[in-house]
Amino acid sequence: MISARLKRSGIVSLAILMAGLVAMSAPAAAAAPALNFQSDTTPNPTISEDELVVHEHDLGDMSSPLEYYDDAGEIATLPATVNDSQTTPVGVRFDQIDTEAYDLFPRIDGEDGNAATWTKTGNWSTSSGSSSSMSVSDATADGVEKVGLSASVASGETATATFGANVSISEDPNKRVLMFVGNVDTLADGATVEIRAVDGDGDYRAAEVNASAIASDDDIIANGTGDGFVFQQRVSDLPLAGSGDGTLDSIQQVDVVAADGNADVTIAGLDLDKKGTFDLAEIERDTDDDGDDETTTVTDYYEGGVANLTSLSTFGDTFENAVINDLRVYDVQYRFADLTDDSDYSVNFSSADDYSYPEKLELYGDLSVPTAIDISHGSLSLELNQSVPTERFVTLEVASGADSAEAFGNVSDSAFTDETGVLSGQDTTATLVDSASGDTTYRVHLVVLLQSEEVDDMQSSGAGMGPTGSSGGGFFGTLFGKVTSIVGTVLGAAGISRYAGGGS
């Protein structure tokens, strides 16, 4: 029989223990559900998105492609994961990148330097054949300063836009690199566009847009219409032509010449000062013409369109503080495993004797996709990778537009739609909601029958959760529940449970 002193000390110890446990139960750092999501058996309901567009991604302030500016102008991160099985999970258009390197030419010191840039339409002049014309306009778009050149050209004639203000490169002109970033918006049949580095007596070296050319040739910018072309080539590697002495002695102007048909070009980046190229990023390209793509860091992008990159971290130093407009992020997954607020999920293992199985798992999860002005969502679908045979699903249901503040067990059955009919067999993917919407909460509820070893596998990296433990909502998710559970365990281990309420 327990002495009165032991009883009194036990009560005091219990009181101290309870006070300590209440203090320990104060809000802690956010944590995901205590399940082993490396196990193929662990259910992980997911809202899948084919393509997310982040309208302004600052490489200087952001590192993850899931970061964006929320509607308060603060940097936020989507509660999601990018499928890491992809080789190229992000995409950019190089003409949509705002970087100082694109518009420094010509590099004029002093307070008037910025006014001399090629991005100012007033620094361009035009000329053409009698039946042709060339116009220059401000084409700024996508957060990037751009100049648009539109040529209407009769057969056998040319139309020219000239940038010559403050251009005077007399030292090593042939060692300079012609850099062009931009779009070929229209190109009539038989038409060509040349970008020429021109000296004082009429000689020039030129790169070309030509539909009949091979895009990867050294002097070819593009062989068709498209966006986001990048060309970087040393001037000495470009063909020499013109009416001078047969030598490019200097660079005094840049001519954009359209010939034999209409053409529209938008310039997002232009340079002839630098003696070296800069790295763009790592992409997949068939570098040796064997039909297989390899990952490679490129200095040009003659394919045009969206360039799919292996990672944002592969951008060259030139883009260190650049802003990517309309960053594309592919195969984004808003998973049950990514939930960090324990009010958004509940996990409970218990006996399944009534079903002639050792145990069962009951899971609730509130999944949603945040919306903001600065992001655009693609196609969204709520999915579940079916990890066990269909007959083991006792319940699989979804409530669309659920109130995340409402306790899991209190939601009316009528709010749920039974989705067991979409299950098609183990190791398949079931689509629970085909066209999901952003900013809508989808409450997933499932009960699945499990073998004991499957439960052990699901909990193999859990936070000490036993076979009948739970996390998230429900009794064990409450402060009192956590305290009571821990106290019961401690008292039982100390032999005090008999005094506290059971047995003799």
Image (cartoon, rainbow, N blue to C red):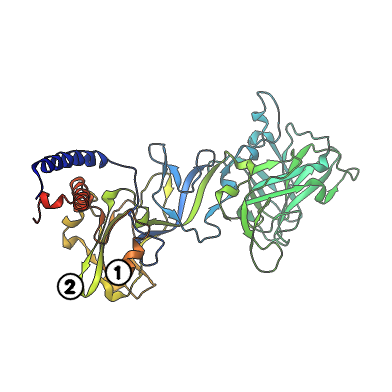
Residue ID at (39%, 67%): 40
Q: Earlier in the sequence, mark 2 or mark 1?
A: 2
- Under mark 1, the amino acid is Ser
Residue ID at (83%, 38%): 172
Mark 2 Cα shell of 10 Å, populated few (<14), some (14-19), many (≥20): few
Number of disc labels: 2
Mark 1 Cα shell of 10 Å, populated few (<14), some (14-19), many (≥20): some
Side of 237 relative to 368 (left or right): right
Side of 455 relative to 271 (left or right): left
Percent x, y of residue 178: 74, 45
Disc 1 target residue: 452
202 and 282: which is toward the camera: 282
The quadrant the C terminus occupies is bottom left
For label 2, the SS is helix
395 and 160: which is toward the camera: 395
The part of the image, by quadrant, that contains residue 402 is bottom left
The part of the image, by quadrant, that contains residue 432 is bottom left
Which numbered mark, 2 or 1, is in the foreground of this view? 1
Question: Does residue 443 show up?
Answer: no
Percent x, y of residue 113: 67, 28
Question: Does residue 372 show up?
Answer: yes
- Please give the label number shown on residue 354: 2
Residue ID at (20%, 50%): 494
Residue 451 vertical position relative to residue 108 in the rendered view, above or below: below
